[in-house]
Image (spheres, rainbow, N blue to C red):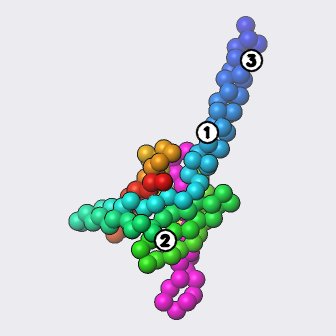
Amino acid sequence: MKTTYSIFIIACLLFCLSACKKDGNANTSSVMGKWNIVKTVYSQARDTTINGLTTDYYDFGSNGALSIQDHQDSMTGVYSLNGTKSVGINIYTVDGHGLGVITQPANYTISDLSSHSLTLTSPPYPAGQYVIYLKR
């Protein structure tokens, strides 16, 4: 009886581990590619919505490279998926002196992920939190 129970537990564990691995690969391919910025909503003392231009985008490359065009700002960085519900983003920007400035890595929560839409929510910052709505 103990042997049958042990085999059942091991089989369940293996099934769960293989299911998690498949989900991770599907999420990577689901996020990859170019996403147009629909709008960004800043939640502070007063909510502010900034609509994306037709030229604004997030481009998640297959090798972890990230390119962002947001109005006049062009940024590059790296991203990695941290499980199925978040993406870690590290953005490189250039300050007014031409020196590269690296932002602190942040884990954005992924919601509303489909083949045509993706929503990223920033971690809460002292100045507020923002939500980025993307579409293909």
The amino acid marked with disc number 2 is: Gln
Question: Mark 2 highlights which residue?
Answer: 69
Q: Residue furthest top?
A: 1
The amino acid marked with disc number 1 is: Asp
> Residue 7, which numbered label?
3
Q: Residue at x 68, y 60 (%)?
A: 63
Range of magenta residues: 82-104
Question: Mark 1 highlights which residue?
Answer: 23
The amino acid marked with disc number 3 is: Ile
Secondary element type, mark 3: helix
| Residue 83 image point, x, y percent | 58, 47
Q: Nearer the viewer, mark 3 or mark 1?
A: 1
Bin the neighbour count of mark 1 within 10 Å (Cα to Cα): few under 14, some 14-19, many 20 and up: few
Secondary element type, mark 1: helix
Q: Is residue 97 magenta?
A: yes
Residue 65 in view here: yes
| Residue 52 image point, x, y percent | 38, 65
Label 1 vs label 2: CA separation? Answer: 29 Å
Of callouts 3 and 1, the N-terminal one: 3
